Amino acid sequence: MNEFKATKALVLNSGGCDSSTLVSLAVKEFGADNVITASLYYGQKHDKELKCAKDIAEFYGVKHIEEDISCVMKYAGEVCSLIKGSKDELIDKSYAEQIAENGSPNSEVPFRNGLFLSIAAAYAISLFPHEEVAIFYGAHADDAAGNAYPDCTSEFADAMDNAIMIGSRNKVRLIRPLINKNKSQVVSLGLKLGTPYHLTTSCYHGRDKACGVCGTCRDRIAAFKANHTRDPIDYEIDIDWEEDK
């Protein structure tokens, strides 16, 4: 197989810290004209993240794709609290606490990243049929820890990369520069790149202000504290940003 040399990048952007950091990285490496971002509505209870992903794309001046794939996830509410119509409420505890109590977080969306990456591969092949394309995927070590989200692990990413390469005739490759980084390291990278974190969202509740207590808010707050800086978004609770410095 010839050495892979991508000329285009497609970034899956959820509007959160991790994927928005990847947008910054892709623009730096490829230039805005060669980057496309994509966000997918899968039936989540709030769509604030879609607006944030669009705002990030506008900030960098890159083409943006938004698609509704909620029909594929119409049964996911049976097992995931993030989906509209779910009988379960979100559990505002850390991932570690949820895993210890229930074996997995109740925010796990069935095979979400597998679905997203497959769609991204189809987009890449269709939009750039004669070029090599890098799909940027924002999974990081904290999401994989304790097997919280199996589709965020290195093993999963390796398998999907292999499948995508085969299915694209070696024209599309899965790039995962955050896979071995924890959340604080991701934020550190984004701060160096100038990622506009004020335009992002992470909270599972999707209200005007982040709740500060759900699993993903807790991780985000801890990451900014570890970098000795204040998160630029607003929270519903008071946070001592000087703590642990």
Image (tube, rainbow, N blue to C red):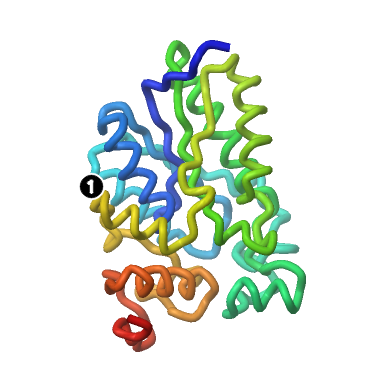
Quadrant where the C terminus lies?
bottom left
Residue at mark 1: 59
Give the crowd class for mark 1: few <14, some 14-19, many >=20 residues within 10 Å: few
Count of numbered badges drawn on the protein: 1
Question: At 48% across and 25% down in the image, what residue appears?
Answer: 124
Query: Toward which corner of the image does residue 84 lie, by quadrant?
Result: bottom right
Q: Is residue 179 above or below residue 220?
A: above
Residue 191 image position (x, y, % from top left): 28, 57
Classify residue 142 as left or right of residue 55: right
Q: Residue 223 location in percent, x, y?
A: 41, 68
Q: Is residue 72 left or right of residue 124?
A: right
Residue furthest to the front in view is 245
Q: Which of the 4 quarters of the picture holds residue 242?
A: bottom left
Relative to 53, is 62 on the left or the right? left
Q: In the figure, 88 relative to 144: above or below?
A: below
Q: Which residue is nearer to you in this view: 204 or 188?
A: 188
Residue occupying the point 70% across, 57% down = 76
Q: Going 71% across and 72% down the picture, which residue do you hit?
A: 99
> Which residue does the image show at 40% across and 30% down from the upper left?
9
Front position in the image: 21 or 58:
21
Amino acid type, callout 1? Phe
Secondary structure at numbered mark 1: helix
Q: Position of residue 17 (x, y in %)?
A: 39, 58
